[in-house]
Amino acid sequence: MEIGNGETPSRILIVCDSTKDRSIHEFSKVIRQIRMCGGIVHPGDTIRVFGVLHKVLHPMGYLMGVAPENFLGATHARAVEEEVLKKVDMYVGMLQYSAEQCERDRVDIEVKITAGTPLRKAIINEVATSNAAWVIFDRPLRKELRYYLKHIPCKAALVLDNFSLQILENEYSNKETEHFDNKQFYSLSKPVPLPPVSDNENEQPVNTTNYHISPESSDTASIWPLSFSSNSKEESIVSHSESQPNPKKEDSGNTRQIMEYYAPIISNQKRRPSRNRYSDVHVLCVTCGLNTELDSMRYSYPEIQLATNNFSPDNLLGEGGYGFVYKGELKDGQRIAAKVRKESSTQGFSEFHSEIFVLNFARHKNIVMLLGYCCKENLNILVYEYICNKSLEWHLFDNTNKVLEWNQRHAIAIGTAKGLRFLHEECRGSPIVHRDMRPSNILLTCDFVPMLGDFGLARWKTDEGEIQTRILGTLGYLAPEYAENGIVSVRTDVYSFGVVLIQLISGRKAVDSKKEDQQPSLRQWALPLIERLALHELIDPRLGETYNTYELYSMAKTAYLCLQTEPERRPSMADVLHLLEGEIDHFSHLTEQFIPHYSM
């Protein structure tokens, strides 16, 4: 088969180290050189920008290498997924101008990011599986150029410092060919759309994109869970479907799955015909009421029955107002927590269905993931990922063998704030109000990464105002406006989070049934101490001197702001996160706005 002759579509790879930063300028110049250099790209070909991510930011805040043995947990795998998705979206944004230029030559551009180590093996694996006609090596890869030229069977070029291309002499030999285990790589690819075209400057563009998610092997499902988060309000997880036919050469040996992200359809929108390749799918839309199908999330009752050993008492994790929670394991090895509604529960099927929608669109590394649901007659079951290390409540109040360390408490506060900020400000559609923020609903991984759970009371907030509802929640954590009048807003959660911060600092329960009835509330006890800066009286005595004074000050002052009686005087969760991360300028701004008499 002839490659690169203009008759058979070919793929040209631009390979780079995605751990390093890239710019629009770099990509534009390299692709321009490829177009100008005769013999590399022809009409009908595809240019794939392929990046390898070999280091990611761990949820606890440090960089770590990407390897399957380092990411066996769902939380770690999710961190990799989110970093890969973020990098793909970043590259797509930087390549849109180049895509417009390439369309004139009838050449497509796509992005593929692979997470895995070592870097050179990921590159060789991609060259082999994509049947590339050309490989263009980025400048930092020149150090191992000899190795690459011995292991790739196609033509190659190197990007020089002035962004021109140097054609390389291939040294490939079948004897040098290496074969790698595909399960050590995790990939996500996406075509680069053209910049939106509109007859009206105020008209919103249609954002129709297509993600190809490749764990590269069906054996890797337990290592790389297929779940993604997007902070964009225009993108949402819609469905799992099989890959659409593509006239271009498909990657050989890959098991591909596609997640399609669609924006709400805007009528009378202009699209370029050559890019209108994907069908429109209905999504959950607050304005028009369109709904996403949930069939892909549905489990059969026998599946859950088998996973939980017929709801064995030995598998019972706990009991709440909603029902019973059982741990279990699906056939594919996925560990689950099955939440079974009590017959006497006041939550009806419509509320159950609503909760599924809320959780389906709340995908974040600090939020417990809803895997699916099950319905049988009057029995409703929610299926969550299993979080391995109990709750913050257990570690703060019930674990007598080990005291939760200060650095863990501080990290839990920040992670929980990130989860709440996502619900309030970044979740697609409307903000979500949790309504039951407390330590028992903050689950922890073995690395003490916090995960917000128990969304039984969570609700969409459909406008910027407050909503009035019946009073549900937990005594000691309810904001005054909610406890007295049933008024709910995102600031209701902020108040509850302030109580949690005081508990993290002090190790005290919000309501202690063993104490006398006349004991002051946790808020009444803590706020005067913070006002006097008597933080030595506020800190958990079990910690001794093993705490960071500056972090303690930041947490205490943040809690003070969150616990203001008037909702409008409380900060947003974005502000809370800034404060917890120690941004002094933000403190000055907020103290002037909320508490003028309380200076730095």
Image (cartoon, rainbow, N blue to C red):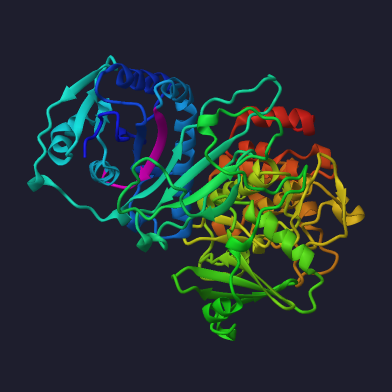
When asked about the image quadrant of residue 574, the answer is: top right
> Residue 220: x percent and y percent?
37, 60
Magenta-colored span: 107-118
Q: Left or right: where does residue 323 sit relative to residue 68?
A: right
Does the stretch in magenta take in 562?
no
Instruction: Report which quarter residue 195 is drawn in.
Output: top right
Q: Where's residue 96, x and y in %?
A: 48, 26
Report x, y in % for residue 408: 52, 53
Specify the quadrant of the image occupied by residue 594. Answer: top right
Closer-to-camera residue (425/343): 343
Residue 426 in the figure: left or right of residue 29 = right
Q: Please state if 106 lies on the left or on the right of 374 as rendered.
A: left
Residue furthest right in the image:
485
**Residue occupying image coordinates x 36% and y 44%:** 114
Quadrant where the N terminus is found in the figure: top left
Q: Position of residue 489 (x, y in %)?
A: 80, 46
Q: Looking at the magenta stretch, what is its main secondary structure? A: strand
Q: Nearer the viewer, residue 151 or 46?
A: 46
Q: Residue at x 38, y 55 (%)?
A: 255
Quadrant where the C terminus lies? top right
Q: Is residue 286 left or right of residue 94?
A: right
